[in-house]
Amino acid sequence: MINFNNNSIYIIMYHYIRDKKKDNFPNLKSLEFSQFKKQINFFKKKLNVLGNDEFNEILNTKKIPKKPSVLLTFDDGYNDHYKYALPLLSKKKIEGFFYPVTKTLENKIILDVNKIHLILAKENNKKKIIYEMNLLLKKYMNKKLDQLDLSPVDLKSRFDDKETMLIKRCLQYFLPEKVRKKILNKLFYLILGKHESDFSKQIYLNKKKILEMSSENMFFGIHGEQHLRWDKINTKKLNKEIDNSVNFFNKIGLNNNNFSVVYPYGFYNSQTLKIIRKKKFLFGLTTRPEKINKNIINKKYILPRFDANDFRI
């Protein structure tokens, strides 16, 4: 449990929130709903839970409240956020910040990152997954993983073992795009036994739920149209990723010109920040685990966040 210090803000990042007793994917890495409730009750009782107006006032004045504060953020637009988070946040009169990937909200596709999650949740034997990956690599590239230069692949993680990180990194970005998409789709069908459209409605929010959440004082921000790494795509594609997300929200009635952003996978570069500043977003969130104090509050486009699993109560 991290100690909460005065004159500090802790932005917390949530992804999956699940009741594993009722879950079709009990091995999916998620925060148990009972733990989520404990966290929310603790934050509400012991800390200052910031809302939209309060946080933006802090960013403008650079005056951090003396009492330890938290800001609650929810990435990727999972149905969990409607089913589990919304009722509790509304009951406690807490404003949450939600960052869905807009392409998923039509409920027709599953993002590559979530395909990887589901594969790993369904098949516990990581060596089997790597074995199948090697067969497909041999087919599409005439090579196996041990014949590739894996030195650029960062296998360090606070939450996953090296085999899991190897699978994730290769299928997220290391392998050539066309090859990794073919491999990922083959693995998904091989291990899950169904096409992605069969799962999409179960996993993601939709327009109706977003509008309902907005009416309950939940705030939505930009996480891209397709969850691409913003440090790996060119300026034209990055602008499209961002603008299409903004236009989607405006089109469904969330006419908010003051969006904040979350960088997919936490990655960004100088070009990313230049575009974010130019578009005058309110702030940008990373995945670097660190508290916000007087030295960091000025860096509003690279604000750190803790993972919800850092706060076991």
Image (spheres, rainbow, N blue to C red):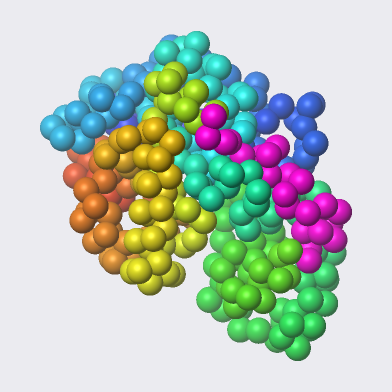
Q: Is residue 35 positioned above or below 15 on the image?
A: above
Q: Nearer the viewer, residue 36 or 292?
A: 36
Q: Is residue 104 positioned above or below 175 on the image?
A: above
Q: Is residue 17 positioned above or below 267 on the image?
A: above
Relative to 275, is 240 on the left or the right? right
- Region of the chain picked out in magenta, as a range: 186-208
Residue 29 visible in the current orientation: no
Q: Is residue 53 positioned above or below 243 on the image?
A: above
Q: Position of residue 153 (x, y in %)?
A: 56, 72
Residue 92 visible in the current orientation: yes
Residue that protrudes farthest toward the left in the picture: 61
Which image quadrant: the C terminus? top right
Query: Can you tell which quarter of the image residue 73 is in?
Result: top left
Q: Nearer the viewer, residue 290 or 227?
A: 227
Q: Nearer the viewer, residue 242 or 48?
A: 242
**Residue at the spot x=46%, y=12% of the render?**
92
Query: Can you tell which quarter of the image residue 233 is in?
Result: bottom left
Q: Nearer the viewer, residue 29 or 263?
A: 263
**How many marks overall?**
0
**Would you say residue 187 sits in the magenta stretch?**
yes
Prevailing SS of the magenta stretch: helix
Q: Position of residue 288 (x, y in %)?
A: 41, 49
**Would you say residue 230 sits in the magenta stretch?**
no
**Residue at the spot x=22%, y=48% of the render?**
280
Residue that protrudes farthest toward the front in the picture: 251
Q: Position of residue 174 (x, y in %)?
A: 58, 73
**Residue at the spot x=47%, y=28% of the render?**
211
Q: Position of residue 72 (x, y in %)?
A: 43, 30
**Residue at the spot x=85%, y=61% of the render?**
190
Relative to 53, is 154 on the left or the right? right
